[in-house]
Amino acid sequence: MNNEWPLWEIFIRGQHGMSHRHVGSLHAPDAEMAIKNARDVYTRRNEGVSIWVVEANNISASSPSDKGPLYEPSESKVYRHPTFFDIPDEVGAM
Amino acid sequence: MYAQMVKSAGTGVKSREEMTEQERAFQDKIDADIKIEPKDWMPDDYRATLIRQIGQHAHSEIVGQLPEGNWITRAPTLERKAILLAKVQDEAGHGLYLYCAAETLGVSRDEITEMLLDGRMKYSSIFNYPTLNWADIGAVGWLVDGAAIMNQVPLQRTSFGPYSRAMIRICKEESFHQRQGYDAIRKMAEGTPEQRKMAQDAMNRLWYPSLMMFGPSDKESVHSAQSMAWKIKINTNDELRQKFVDQTVPQAEYLGLSIPDPDLKWNEERGHYDYTDPDWSEFFDVIKGNGPCNVDRLAARNKAWDDGGWVRDGLLAHARKKRTRNLAAE
Amino acid sequence: MTRDEAFLQFLLRMGDNSLILGHRVSEWCGHAPVLEEDIALANTALDLIGQTQMWLGFAGEIDGGKSADDLAFLRDAWDFRNVLLVEVPNGDFGRTLMRQFLFDAWHSIMLGRLMKSSDERVAAIAAKASKEVTYHLERSGDTVVGLGDGTEESHARMQDALNYLWPYVGEMFASDDVDAEIAKAGIAPNPADLRAEYDELIGRVLTEATLIIPESRFAHKGGRDGWMHTEHLGHLLTQMQWLQRAYPGATW
């Protein structure tokens, strides 16, 4: 039997109000230890307030050939991105 | 630079006419600075070369823990002990990030570890040199990490996404390493006569091994040309070595340390320092396993791995039992 | 014994425990069974070194304006006030983690009480340290359970570790004049009073780990009053203090 610890993908919420972001991976025997390892490995510089772990082989990913249909529609909606709008300097930060 | 003399797989750079349509599309992406991600199609040679390079880089971080770890229990103050321990811990973290990047290419951590342990894969020659006095710890941070950063900063732009992201994370942490090293050796250079002697001794022993970190000249290497076309190598070894020398000489002057190279001098015409190349026969000896510490370094890694087997197995066995029990309880 | 003398002894006991254990744990750096554990152990050691700086820094102020480094690097073995448990050699990873767990359990209970110390600075140091040690205990406890309830080999090794370390547990709950004086001033609890809570805590974890606590209550002693340390402490200090001793007066 393969005795290698499973691989986990680590997601960390860096600040309150932000969403969890993928920061990397690590190995751990189970989810509890994966969370603890994530704390030790990925928050050495106080980077996190909340940690999610997902066993890597439980992640379903779109295959690269899907890239067209899945992503192109949103790419055309550039107005969803704030930088699309030109704000006059006098208005100040927005 | 923790990856030295990584042989790229394949026969060298293909012209566009020689490429298949898939290969052309792949090269176009790279030329357009679009990152290659693990599930994207990639040439087998690209994958194999990357595994070699990332693996060698990761192994270097891990073996690199040893020469510095050698001084953790002898650090002269509580603060220095904490800084050094945090630094060596970071090296372990860097190794971990890089192993994870390699895993996305289909080689597991255990597999790649075994390749280090049985000598199939290499690590940087620098870590086969000993750390003999406390100033070595400063010198390693300043010179060795300084040399590593030269290579790592451009590698943040490397074509393979996971590798690039690991390098970004590593570079963020690495500047702390070089600064703490310079700070530590500066304290020595400005200290008692004995401390100055330690600092100069460290400089004398580590200067040329630091220059070796960039590897021999590769201007004409087909491997380098291929790796550069793939953007997994960004600069030639000589470019980086020159940059390192140019950066380091004034820093050494500030410390009042002399660089053990009588021919080192500023060349007004080139706008660079002229310097003496390291003894490449010594370098090849170290690469072949005859450096001062090769045998001990590898033995230490093998011992840690072998001694740890029961721990890895034990914790995994418990996790499996727990899962079975939880399933049964549902 | 005056209150100030007792207070200094108390601070040295807290500081030396974290100093010596932090040193022992740091010996693992680069040699742990798996990278994730290597990194985690270094975090524990770093926390302990940080706590040392706080405790010994405070102790040094009382002790005629010494620095934490003076106390760590320029005292001889008989001046050290750590319990014997923390100075015994690491042994295998199992023994290191078992020792960590047995100490963390005491440490977390102790710090919990110290947070209510009548001395504000003690309370503040304890508050910071307590957060760190709560995590140490969680991690070492989980590892002890995992290895105790793991394979046959890991189980046997953990039981060996417990058997070896058990005689060093009792010293953490020994009480003497120093403790009485300090307890009277409301600075710290009498260690003997923590034993019931400790037994309950480790009993729970060790049962889950399927390990058996030895019946003997025999306890080695001599660390926390410096009367008789183990032979191991001298070797540890030889390494730790070497540079400071060989080059007196240098700054690093």
Image: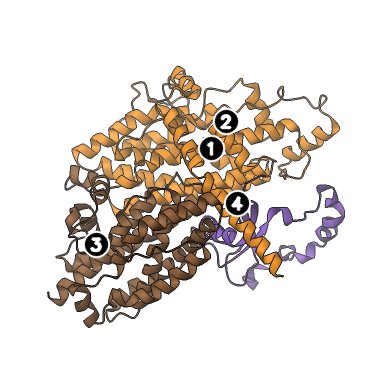
Residue A27's label in the rendered image is 4
Quick check: B42 left or right of C122?
right
The residue positioned 48% from the left and 25% from the top of the image is B270
> Which numbered disc, 2 or 1, marks the residue that appears first in the sequence?
1
> For mark 2, what is the residue?
B121
| Chain of the residue displaying label 4 | A
Mark 1 is surrounded, within 10 Å at the Cα level, by few (under 14), some (14 to 19) or many (20 or more) other residues, namely many
Q: Nearer the viewer, mark 3 or mark 1?
A: 3
Amino acid at pointer 3:
Lys
> For mark 1, what is the residue?
B59
Instruction: Please determine whether, in this image, residue C248 is positioned above or below residue C116.
Output: above
Q: Nearer the viewer, mark 4 or mark 1?
A: 4
Quick check: C211 left or right of C248?
right
Pick the front one: B233 or A57: A57
Q: Nearer the viewer, mark 2 or mark 4?
A: 4
| Chain of the residue displaying label 1 | B
Instruction: Please determine whether, in this image, residue C37 is positioned above or below residue B31.
Output: below
Q: Which chain is brown?
A: C
| Chain of the residue displaying label 2 | B
Label 1: which secondary element: helix
Q: Which chain is purple?
A: A
- Asked whether the residues under the numbered discs 4 and 1 touch, taking CB atoms below 8 Å apart as contact, a structural biologist would say no
- Asked whether the residues under the numbered discs 2 and 1 touch, taking CB atoms below 8 Å apart as contact, a structural biologist would say yes
Q: Quadrant of the N terminus of chain C?
A: bottom left
Mark 3 is surrounded, within 10 Å at the Cα level, by few (under 14), some (14 to 19) or many (20 or more) other residues, namely many
Q: Are marks 3 and 1 on the same chain?
A: no
Instruction: Please determine whether, in this image, residue C252 is positioned above or below residue A46.
Output: above
> For mark 3, what is the residue?
C221
